[in-house]
Amino acid sequence: MGDVYNFNWTDLGDLAVGRPNLGEETSVIVYRLMQYTFKDVLSKEIGKQRAVELFVQAGLLAGKEFCNNVLDTSLSFNAFIADLKDKLVALKVGVLRVEEADMDQLKFVLTVAEDLDCSGLPIFGESVCDYDEGFIAGIFEQYTGKKFTVKEVDCWATGDRTCRFEVKPIEG
Amino acid sequence: MDANQVLVEISTCFKEAMRNGIGAEGLSFPFDPEDIVDDGLKDICRRLSAVFDMINESYRYAELLARGDLKAQASRTNIFAMPLKGLQSSLAHLTWQANQVAAGDLSQQVHFLGEFSNSFNLMINSIREKKIIEQQFKLITEVLGEGVFLVDYSGKIIFSNPESNRLLGYSSSEIENVLIQEVIHKQQLDGTLYKPAENLLFDAISIGINYDDEGAFTCKSGFLMPVTIASRPVFKDEKLDGAVIAFRDITEQKKYEQSLETINKLLETQATTDALTGIYNRVKFDRTLITEISKAERYSSPLSVIIFDIDHFKRVNDTYGHSAGDNVLKRLAKLVGANIRETDVFARWGGEEFVIQVPGVSLAQTAIFADKLRSKIEEFDFSEPERITVSFGVAAFQHGDNGTTLINRADKALYRAKENGRNQVCHSE
Ligand SMILES: [Zn+2]
């Protein structure tokens, strides 16, 4: 066919209709099973570096869509972060906490405890929350209208107990 | 070294630490693993030595965190330090949250930190409630329709509500931090400046008592606004902190009071004035006579009355018409009015009859005075007719007199003057 798929929030389906008995939630094992098998297959097909880049890219799209469909971008920054934190807890994504926020330069240090992607993982010696990096960047981009780069500097998989992300705007 | 010796060495080291603590030196692995000959055992000892290093590092790391150093770091592979890293990130977040709260962000909540979460969230809720009360207070002052100031005990304005700004013409930033007694309430309603001890509102603020009165506030324009002022002291920890002052513009009320006063004066004048001549009427004359009689009775001071009547006035009306007659009455009233003292009370008795109270003057003196009036009238040009004459009766107060008896005696004297041929003064005995 050669055509592309464009994600649409409604493609997530109507869970009330579709899963009357099993409901909205699933197990983290299943989520991780999909994520890490994707990583396995993709890294073998296109190389690990490229696979990681694609995870970040997908996360970015997810973050923007999540921001558009779930969050209230009309809120002030403080209220927005409080709302984001509540939503991430409610959806069991993780516990978001702000460690530093420089509102002038839009530089932030955030932590996510009990992160969906990595908490409880063995120590790989490298951070694994590539998808999260994109996800956070997507949310910030959608809220501020500026592009952001997000780097996971600490991760459960690097021996920390929370994932720590440095968030800063891309200059220019 | 065999395995048994290795275990004994390590055990000794632990025994020491379990008695004395790890201390500043830390645990030191009792020998160099590289000295072990057996490769398998060497490998085990290397790993044990690495565990020793991790224990030392996490111990120091914990010490730094315990001192509040949130920049402390432990290596990524240190498995003992991991829970502490979780604690460190929580503390870093809490530090940020506390700063946010200090900056006014009350959306902060702490999750999943046990008791601490409850305490922190309770604290936030109570700050929120206080903020709500503060907002409600502000809202109340806004809808109140009265000016409200919050001042400290020195009179410095800390808060002014929109109504006070509207009334006085200041913005909040212009008026806050100024001393109320130096800018707003420094003048009395008549414009004179308060002397230091006279400013009762300021006194009430500085000593912490209630104050309710009318006064004046100076607007930004300089206009002096009449206001009602209510001031109540505010105490913090049982110490005087300042006062809440509510005030209302009473310019309209004052105007109303003044117009009421004017109307009352007018009504009073109308009730006591003779409409034609503009001098007092009989009502006023009777009223003042009562006062004068009681004075004369009390102080035994002389009091005389004169009653006089235009001779042949009917002829004036018949010959020249009623308006000419009225003119004669008016001119006569003016002429006599110009020749009496301020203390004398001059009134129209009715028709062409007039009366004068002459307090402090004896009968004889009053008769002389009356005769002077008589000749002035006789010589005066009334134009239509040119000449008129007047007959006078004079009487003086006697002990036991009332208004009626006194006037009656004067009236009898007047009657005699008429009998005797008019244009003359007669007095009672
Ligand atoms: Zn992670």
Image (spheres, coloured by chain):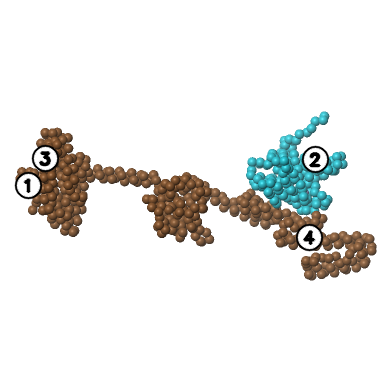
Chain colours: A cyan, B brown
Q: Does the image show residue B408?
A: no
- Answer left or right for A4 relative to B338: right
Q: Are dots 2 and 1 on a single chain?
A: no
Q: Residues within 10 Å of mark 4 (few under 14, many from 20)?
A: many
Instruction: Give whichever of A111, B14 is nearer the camera.
Output: A111
Name the residue beneath numbered marker 3: B388
Closer to the chain start, of discs 3 and 4, is 4
Q: Residue at x 94, y 62 (%)?
A: B38
Q: Secondary structure at mark 4?
A: helix
- Subunit that carries the residue with mark 4: B
Residue A32: percent from left, percent from top? 80, 45
Marks 3 and 4 sit apart, C-alpha to C-alpha, by 131 Å
Q: Are marks 2 and 4 in contact (CB under 8 Å)?
A: no
Q: Residues within 10 Å of mark 3 (few under 14, many from 20)?
A: many
Residue B84 vs B417, above or below: the answer is below
Q: Quadrant of the N terminus of chain B?
A: bottom right
Closer to the chain start, of discs 1 and 3, is 3
Q: Decide if ligand 1 comes within 8 Å of the CB at mark 3.
A: no
Question: In the rendered structure, which amino acid carries the disc numbered 4?
Answer: Ser
Q: Secondary structure at mark 1?
A: helix
Name the residue beneath numbered marker 1: B416
Q: Nearer the viewer, mark 2 or mark 3?
A: 3
Q: Are marks 3 and 4 in contact (CB under 8 Å)?
A: no
Q: Residue at x 13, y 51 (%)?
A: B366
Q: Residues within 10 Å of mark 2 (few under 14, many from 20)?
A: some
Residue B94: percent from left, percent from top? 68, 54
Residue B44 vs A85, above or below: the answer is below
Name the residue beneath numbered marker 2: A54
Question: In the rendered structure, which amino acid carries the disc numbered 2?
Answer: Leu
